[in-house]
Image (cartoon, rainbow, N blue to C red):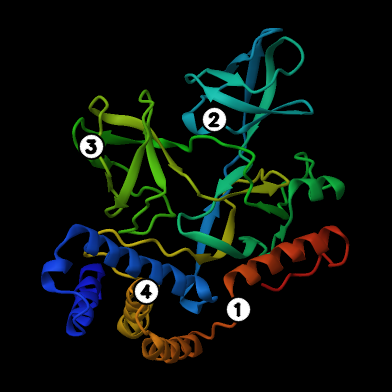
Amino acid sequence: MNYGELQTEYFAYLGELNILTSAITATTPVQATAKRHINAAYQEICSAYDWGWLRDEVRIPYVEQETGTITIGAESLVATIGGGLSLRLSHQGQLLRYEDQLIRIAEVIDGTTCVLASHPGAALVAEDITIYNDVYFFPWDFLSLVSARDEVDQRELIVANPHQMVRAGRLDPDDSGDVAWIDVDFKQLARDQWTDTTVSVTNGSAQVDHAAASWDTFVRTGVSLGDATLKIEGDNREYTIQRFNGNNQLFLTEPYKGTTNATANYAINPMSRRRYRLLPLPNEADQALIIEYLRRPVNMVLDTDEPIDIPEEYHYSVLLTKAIIKAFEQRQLDARALRAEFGEALKDMKQRSGANSTRFGFRMSRMAQGTAVMAGRIDTSATATP
């Protein structure tokens, strides 16, 4: 069933019991309550267990290091980049290495000029530099990490944070590039996630078109993202993304107010999107990280949206029943019989999935494992068990 069909069945059930009349169900507040009950039930069911069908895998390529030169004055944070390296908006927030210093690029002004977060300590003229990307983003629907492994040799990366890595002496970016550590939920860096592609925006329209093959490898067709915003270069406004419509189009929750532009640079900034840091910094091209993760169900918005993270045969017996229970509880009605039906259907769904742990507990065990590794209680040469 899709979102609209679930709402129809929700009202039909309550109507048969004379809890709601057709006149009442036509009102906006009651319809909003039904949508809220259905989406809340969807989230609670999907978050209750480590459902087998909610596991997913994605390949995330490493960003290759780039080399060039830097020229900067003695008391200026504005640097000129040369040596064949052309700056892009996506360089913003990356690390610039000069000798033994790692300095964050705070802002990219144009192809040859950027602003650094700190000064290298002396005036420089055409000195060699390397630019690293150390922060990567999880997929849009990421909820928790199951495993992370190197694509080439299938080594599993150990989960740890930078403080643990420093204590272990594993934070040197001059290492061979043999990535071994992953810092999950790295939140110290807040930046616009600028891309190297463009979009077409039209003043007064909520539609945004993308000329490339896809938005990125992490967006599923039809996903609605109420916690993500779109930012267009030169426009200080941030627009909430309602949903993606295939690989080449998205819709905003309000019309675009800026200037019409067929080739606008853009950033997509999920308010709660999680990121991670790889260490040592990868320096090999054509390699990638394979992430196995648990998906976060995304709320339905349009009537044609489907609760894709619950098998269709359980849409009525589990999802709809849970939503109706919420309606009963709101009205302080006796929901014991419904809870019994829901419990039996959920038990059947759980047995089919083989789910045996909550997501929260699973995620904490991964973090505990990383702590144990850093404390020397786990052999890092062995492959960890997901």
Which of label 2 and label 1 is nearer to you? 1
Q: Earlier in the sequence, mark 4 or mark 1?
A: 4
| Residue ID for mark 3 | 255
Q: Amino acid at mark 4?
A: Lys
Residue 24 x %, y %: 16, 67
Of 120 and 130, the residue lying toward us: 120
| Residue ID for mark 2 | 92
- Secondary structure at badge 4 equals helix
Within 10 Å of disc 3 (Cα), the crowding (few <14, some 14-19, many 20+) is some
Answer yes or no: is residue 85 visible.
Answer: no
C-alpha distance separating marks 4 and 3: 34 Å
Q: Earlier in the sequence, mark 2 or mark 1?
A: 2
Q: Amino acid at mark 2?
A: Gln
| Residue ID for mark 4 | 326
Whether pointer 2 and pointer 1 mark residues with C-beta atoms closer than 8 Å, the reply is no
Residue 41 x %, y %: 39, 71
C-alpha distance separating marks 4 and 1: 24 Å
The label shown at residue 357 is 1
Q: Earlier in the sequence, mark 3 or mark 1?
A: 3
Task: Judge whether 295 appears above or below 322 on screen.
Answer: above
Whether pointer 3 and pointer 1 mark residues with C-beta atoms closer than 8 Å, the reply is no
Which of label 4 and label 1 is nearer to you? 4
Query: Left or right: where does residue 85 sit relative to residue 368?
Result: left
Which of label 4 and label 2 is nearer to you? 4
Query: Left or right: where does residue 44 sit relative to residue 151?
Result: left
Q: Based on the displayed image, in which of its 4 quarters is residue 173 positioned? A: top right
The quarter of the image holding the C terminus is: bottom right
Query: Left or right: where does residue 353 sit relative to residue 364?
Result: left
Q: Earlier in the sequence, mark 2 or mark 3?
A: 2
- Secondary structure at badge 1 equals loop
The quarter of the image holding the N terminus is: bottom left
Within 10 Å of disc 2 (Cα), the crowding (few <14, some 14-19, many 20+) is many
